[in-house]
Image (cartoon, helix red, strand yellow):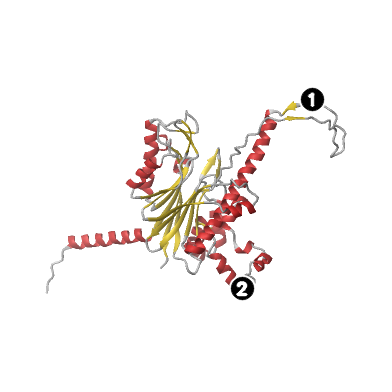
Amino acid sequence: MAYNIDVDGLDSMAAAVEHNDIEQMRVANIKIASINLFNFIEPPLAYYDFENIYSHGQWQKKCQWLSEFLTHRQPDIVGFQEVFSPEPLKRIASEQGLAHFAIVDEPTLISDYIYRSPVVALASRYPIVEISSVEPDARLVAAMGLSSEFAFSRKVLRATIEVPHIGKCDFYVVHFKSKRAGLALEPKLIEPKRFENQPLGFDNSAPAASIKLHSETQLLTEQALGRWASTMQRGAEAALLFNGILVRRQASKYPVIVMGDFNDSLTMGALDALTIQGESIHSNDIKAAGLGHLSDAALAAVFAQYQLKDAYELFIEANLFINANQQGSLTGNTAYHREHRAATHYYGPKGSVLDYILLSSEFDASHGRSLAQVVDYQTCDRHLVRPEYERDAYSTDHAPVIVELALRS
């Protein structure tokens, strides 16, 4: 018996199957991005100073850069920092399929059309079921010896999103205090002492004419004190946010993703709270908490459900493991990639990683109950390392970071 075979029809069916496979992959994989937009403000509004107003052409280029970035990278959920004008941002995001938008604060009007204190925002392809700001616990603020007026330098946004195949996830968007000193002391008159040939600690109380601090002395003092004040603020923000995440996670059991501009390296002490590990907790403190009866394995499992890990670390650990088995050099591979991690910000010629995405154990491939794993991590730095003026002049001074998650089979 002869059969008439429609070759064109088979080709169409094959193309359809391939398209469906791609669509299935797209549904299964989730892309999450964090972008510092660098003074995203619509003219005729100004940021910080009346001279800081984009022309119409400059603003159009800035919006076009963002739109093209979202079109090319196709993230599903994006956390934004340095937002002065949320409505244009919401419109651009919506045009790229990110129809759900969240914001919990507004910039501060200094005078007339001049603003300061930009805010964070979030856009999502998937429904946002709850939006909230994270407020520091007043009891803990007092216990830390902080002022009762302590607040996050920028309000932290928490959005609960219904993520396909995973369920409700809590997304936090942060922009921690910068390293900039931000401390101006009143000029002070001091009494000079005659220190020549005097023993250490000797107080020469003979009267002398008052003098004003030299400009360089004043500046160095302000920088030393101001930078330390910024570090303390940033560290307190990280610790108090971590407490808020713990309390919420204990109640909701939702997976957690924290993203944003951390304004510091995770390897520096100020941000230790966010990635604290059980191994660093003293045994006496564990016993005092009533957990001394647990075995090491049980204790590790208890802590693991609350720990946050750098998505980049999870990426190289999960994806280099196969290569390492083949090449026999897991340690060498991971060490190399840690050392050569791309910077997300440059101050002059010096690059630093300031922008992060942190993930809870549900996205850690080494965790027995993980739901997904990191299959790709991108630092989008072309506009910083190979800029083209027409395309990148009004982009941003940070490199966006993107994480791609795939469901565990």
Q: Residue flagged by tag 1: what amino acid is it?
A: Ala
Q: Nearer the viewer, residue 155 or 276?
A: 155
In the image, which is nearer the foreground, mark 2 or mark 1? Answer: 1
- Where's residue 91, x and y in %? 35, 43
Is any atom of residue 142 visible in this view?
yes
Q: Which residue is mark 1?
A: 209
The residue at the far left in this view is: 1
Q: Is residue 370 above or below residue 192?
A: below
Q: Residues within 10 Å of mark 1 (few under 14, many from 20)?
A: few
Q: Residue at x 57, y 50 (%)?
A: 237
Q: Residue flagged by tag 2: what amino acid is it?
A: Ser
Left or right? Give the position of 195 relative to 144.
right
Left or right? Give the position of 21 relative to 403.
left
Mark carried by residue 295 = 2
Q: Is residue 277 above or below residue 109?
A: below
- Where's residue 58, x and y in %? 40, 33
